[in-house]
Image (spheres, helix red, strand yellow):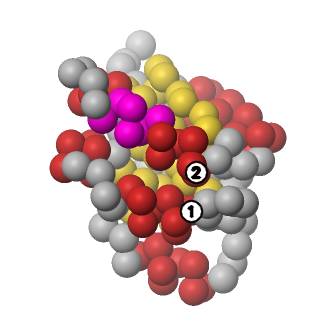
Amino acid sequence: MSEPKYRTVMLIDDNEIDNLINQKMIEAAALTKHIYTCTGAKSAIEFLRNIEKIEVADQVLPDLIFLDIDMPLMDGFQFLDEFEKFGNLVKKKCKIIMLTSSINPQDFNKAKKYLNVKLYLNKPLSHESIMNLSV
């Protein structure tokens, strides 16, 4: 059996069912061994801030972050604004994939303005979209 493509993946979505579906799809595709799930962007930012402070941060930080756009308290774009404040280690290590059920072209265009956003996918994830990831 080959090694997973990514060491660690993070899911950020306020909808726990979407998180569960996406987690199961990622597990079925054997994309990673470790999946962090957060049900809010604020808690995800805190989680990343705490990891950034530890010595082995480069080994624990997620390689991929699947980020929902539409969430209460802090939406995906507000998360991205906070993410920009992280140091180089976090910004280089974590590649962000925007996940949305929105078909609003403004969201897509806004997401393209962030350097760390590598892909924009509709949710829920499909086996095909996971297998075709190239970020």
Q: Give coordinates of residue 33: x percent, y percent.
A: 47, 20
Q: Main secondary structure of the magenta part?
A: helix
Which quadrant is the N terminus positioned in? Answer: top left
Query: Quick one: label 1, few (<14), some, or many (20+) residues within 10 Å?
Result: many
- Horizontal relation, residue 106 to residue 116: left or right: right
Q: Is residue 105 above or below residue 81?
A: below
Disc sitting over residue 30 in the figure = none
- Secondary structure under tag 1 reads helix
Contact, mark 1 vs mark 2 (Cβ under 8 Å): yes
Quarter holding residue 115: bottom left
Residue wearing tag 2: 41
Q: Nearer the viewer, residue 74 or 103?
A: 74
Residue 76 visible in the snapshot: yes
Q: For the point 57% across and 49% down, which residue is it?
A: 42
Q: For the point 69% across and 78% down, which residue is it?
A: 103
- Horizontal relation, residue 125 to residue 110: left or right: right
Q: Nearer the viewer, residue 61 or 74?
A: 74
Q: For the point 53% across and 78% down, which residue is it?
A: 108
Q: Is residue 91 magenta?
A: no
- Horizontal relation, residue 110 to residue 95: left or right: right
- Identify the amino acid type marked 1: Gly
Q: Give coordinates of residue 122: x percent, y percent.
A: 64, 62
Residue wearing tag 1: 76
Q: Residue furthest bottom?
A: 106
Query: Quick one: label 2, few (<14), some, or many (20+) residues within 10 Å?
Result: many
Q: Is residue 76 above or below residue 92?
A: below
Quarter holding residue 25: top right
Q: Which residues are magenta?
A: 47-52
Cα separation, mark 1 vs mark 2, equals 7 Å
- Identify the amino acid type marked 2: Ala
Q: Give coordinates of residue 56: x percent, y percent.
A: 24, 21
